[in-house]
Image (tube, helix red, strand yellow):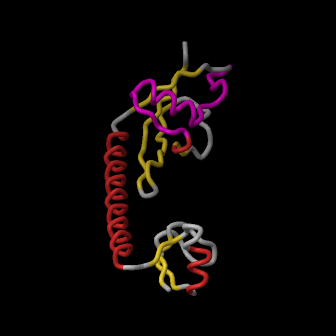
Amino acid sequence: MKIILLEDVKSLGKKGDIVDVNEGYARNCILKKNLGVEANASNMNDLKLKKNNDAKIAQEQLEAAQAFAKELESKEVTILIKAGEGGKLFGSVTGKEIAQAFKDQCKVDVDKKKIQLAEPIRSFGVFDVKVKLHPQVTGSLKVKVKEQN
């Protein structure tokens, strides 16, 4: 019996897969627990439409991320931080502080987890910071770290 999985089933398949199982297993386990539906013409058509819709939404998200990445390259964020003795930073600049400064200065919310710093910024100057906007798109943001008076 052919079944379209509605959820991931361990050792059987992932959501949206069409699998061939025994009738008893299908009736007593898969269909009873609403883990899948029978692969008839109507359900196959629904699956096809859903996959097309999901692909369209994924493409729109990719295009939006690419547009935001281009916009991000023109932006610049300035962070004022106290200096210790000898002109060194008093502490460091982390992704959380960059996200907050970007939100305050550019009025755009960026998740701090998407800001990729190999290590916190510990000196004054201009830095290019990578921002992961989508699994396939990474933008770049200029961060100026200046001494607070």
- Residue 108 on image: x %, y %: 40, 32
Residue at screen point 59% across, 68% down: 33
Task: Kindly indicate the quadrant of the structure image that contains residue 86.
Answer: top right
Q: As rendered, which of 37 and 91 lies closer to the eye?
A: 37
Viewport quadrant of the C terminus: top right
- Residue 26 on image: x %, y %: 56, 80
Q: As rendered, which of 2 and 144 lies closer to the eye?
A: 2
- Residue 147 on image: x %, y %: 54, 20
Can you say whether 111 is above or below 107 in the image? below
Residue at screen point 51% across, 33% down: 99
Left or right of residue 78: residue 70: left
- Residue 65 on image: x %, y %: 37, 49
Residue 104: in magenta span: yes
Residue at screen point 57% across, 33% down: 96
Can you say whether 16 is above or below 105 in the image? below
Q: As rendered, which of 139 and 149 lies closer to the eye?
A: 139
Q: Which residues are magenta?
A: 85-112
